[in-house]
Image (spheres, rainbow, N blue to C red):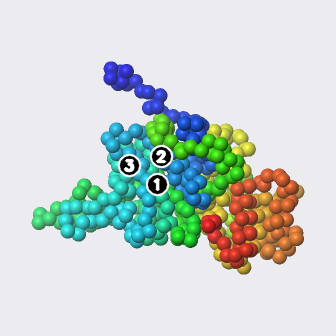
Amino acid sequence: PLDYLPDLKSPSQTAGDLSELLNAFETQANDSAVGLRVARPLLLRFIASLAAKPFLILGGLSGSGKTKLAQALARWLSQLPLDGEAAYALIPVGADWTGNDNILGYPDGLDAARYITRPALDLIQRAMQPDRASEPHFLILDEMNLSHVERYFADLLSLIESGEPLELYRPELNKDGIEQLRSGVAPLLSLPPNFFIIGTVNVDETTYMFSPKVLDRANVIEFRMEREELEAFLAAPIRPAIESLDGQGCQFGAAFVQAAGQQVPAVVSEKFRSELLLMFDLMRDHGSEFGFRVANEAVRFMHFYRLFGGYGEDESEWFNDAMDAVIVQKLLPKLHGSRPRIEGLLWALALACGGDRAGLDATAWLARCRDAGNARDELALGPEVVERGLKGQKARYPLSFGKVMRMWRKVVRDQFVTFSEA
């Protein structure tokens, strides 16, 4: 029909409602023919995080599906590459990456008219083309911490945060005083709003730790394996066929790009304000406070969590799950240090995320958490007391509480702890 009715669009080409994006991707990704096996809560955090900030880090257990999930969403949202130029690139980071030339290329020292490009730079330039401005483009950096991330990624971090163009090279002047560009690459580079970066991180003795200043600039989603997930896989051990997702969700691409580039409502709920200030006060007491950027990205995440989850503005049952994700993805990743420095903060956070607040207003609850932060009365305010007090019930913020407990047990055992679990 497209041959003689060019205005007719197939269902996959029609605009998609963002409130249906999550349902569509969940259904297709978990289809038995694809076999991705991703739970809805994780998918919601994953998609909301990308919309809130175009830089996302997936960390945790090796072989838990981090790269596959990143590939799956990129291929699902991207249009089929009619010209052979895909809207995503999977680039493995090498242990020998000591500069930005592996990402942004470099000027040819022997030919003044040539610039040596790299796949990442080629992808950025494709995303900048006017006819592809509404299509999301994804750069997936696999095993980001095989090399020092600051050495090769600092320029992209600056581009993400500042929005200011980066000078790739300084054009030389010919005999007529006209600037000579190199190989069609503009001297200045900016990241377009339809460009998203997903990095995967595995932590072991062969890798480098991420610095807090890098983690502070991204949402960090930690992948862990549950027994039920492994049991389900063993019942039908198949390799995920993510290639069958190609282009299946491209009708949502333009709406996703538009939403990610928009400002979110400036008014936040009193409940969110109270919870974020509680966490700020507790972390500031121990020298680990966060700044405006983290607060802004937390507000954006809450907005997109509600949007993609399909929750109404008057609904509230989603709030605790969204706030839990903010704490574990944006606040906890920067925590690291020795036991004398960090144990008190972990006690305070354990109580704040899992303790019983019945009968206490915000001021009294902050005072009680601060008492726990002194890390003195283990029989009354210690993390294990909080854990036992739940009595099989769900903590207010279960993801954050579980992570704080693991970090606390590790700092007791090793006298030092970081967010990443080796």
Residue at figure coordinates x 37%, y 52% from the top left: 123
Q: Are there few (<14), some (14-19), or many (20+) residues within 10 Å of tag 2?
A: many
Name the residue carrying label 1. 140
N-term mark: 2 or 3: 2
x and y, in percent, of residue 230 in the image: 66, 49
Q: Amino acid at mark 2?
A: Ala
Q: Amino acid at mark 3?
A: Ala
Q: Looking at this rendering, what residue extends furthest in the bottom direction?
A: 340
N-term mark: 1 or 2: 2
**CB under 8 Å between discs 1 and 2:** yes
Assign a secondary structure to mark 3.
helix
> From mark 2 to mark 3, how far is it between C-alphas?
13 Å
x and y, in percent, of residue 225 in the image: 65, 54
Name the residue carrying label 2. 74
Assign a secondary structure to mark 1.
strand
Q: Determine whether, in the image, residue 175 is placed left or right of residue 90.
A: left
